[in-house]
Amino acid sequence: MGRLHARALRAGSAAEVDRGAWVQGCLNGVANAPEQIPTGPVTIRTPDAKLLEQFRTWARAEGERQEVDHTRALIAVQLTEHDYDVEISTDYPAGSGKSEVETLVHSFVEWWDGDHGREGIARNILILGADGKVLTAQRI
C-alpha cells in the first residue's frame, strides 16, 4: 500500500488534484478490479490545528523553535478509508534553503514516530511552501 501512495506523490501534478482517486485507481489496478471512476473528489482534506499545536509544543521543547515558527497549517489528507498523508503549510518561499525544510520534516517524523499521530495510518509528510507547492515529501 505504501508504494501506491509514493507512486501518487511521484505523479506530481497529474495526481495532485485528487491523490485519493489516484491511489484508489492504483489499488484497483493491483487487484485486477474493474475500473471504478469516481463520481466526485475522493481525497478529503481536514485541517487539524490541535495536532499542529501539539507538534509545535513538542518541537519547541526540543529546541526546534525556528523551524516550527514557519508552520501555518496542518492538513490530514485522507486518501483511502484508513490511509492518509499529512501536509504542513509553511511560509517558506519557493526555493527555500533545503536544510530548513529537511529539519522540519525530520522533526515531524521523529515526533510522529513517538506515537503522537492520529488514528489510521499516515503514509507521507509533505511540506508545502507559501505558494502551496510541495517543497519536500517523505515517508513516515
Image (spheres, grey):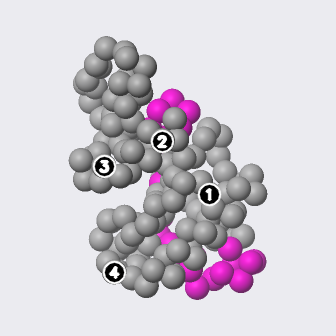
Which callout, 2 or 3, points at the residue further toward the start of the chain?
2
Instruction: Name the kind of residue labelled 3 in the image.
Output: Ala
Which callout, 4 or 1, points at the residue further toward the start of the chain?
1
Which callout, 4 or 2, points at the residue further toward the start of the chain?
2
Select label 4 or label 1 by which is in front. Answer: 4
Task: Determine the residue positioned at 68% across, 74% down.
Answer: 59
Instruction: Name the kind of residue labelled 2 in the image.
Output: Arg
Give the class, few, some or many, for how many residues have Cα within 10 Å of label 3's Cα (few <14, many ≥20).
Answer: few
Looking at the image, which residue sits at the far top? 34
Query: How far apart are the two marked residues, 4 and 2, measured between alpha carbons?
Result: 27 Å
Residue 67 on the magenta span: yes
* Label 3 secondary element: loop
Residue in front for this viewpoint, 118 or 133: 133
Residues tagged 1 and 2 counted as in contact (Cβ below 8 A):
no
* Residue with the mark numbered 3: 11
Q: Is residue 113 above or below residue 8?
A: below
* Residue with the mark numbered 2: 3
Q: Is residue 74 above or below residue 58?
A: above
Select label 3 or label 4 by which is in front. Answer: 3
Query: How far apart are the two marked residues, 2 and 3, measured between alpha carbons?
Result: 12 Å
* Residue with the mark numbered 1: 51
Give the class, few, some or many, for how many residues have Cα within 10 Å of label 1's Cα (few <14, many ≥20).
Answer: some
Place of residue 76 in the rendered image (x, y in percent of width and height, measured from the top left): 50, 49
* Label 1 secondary element: helix
**Relative to 92, 66 lies left or right:** right
* Residue with the mark numbered 4: 95
Which callout, 1 or 3, points at the residue further toward the start of the chain?
3
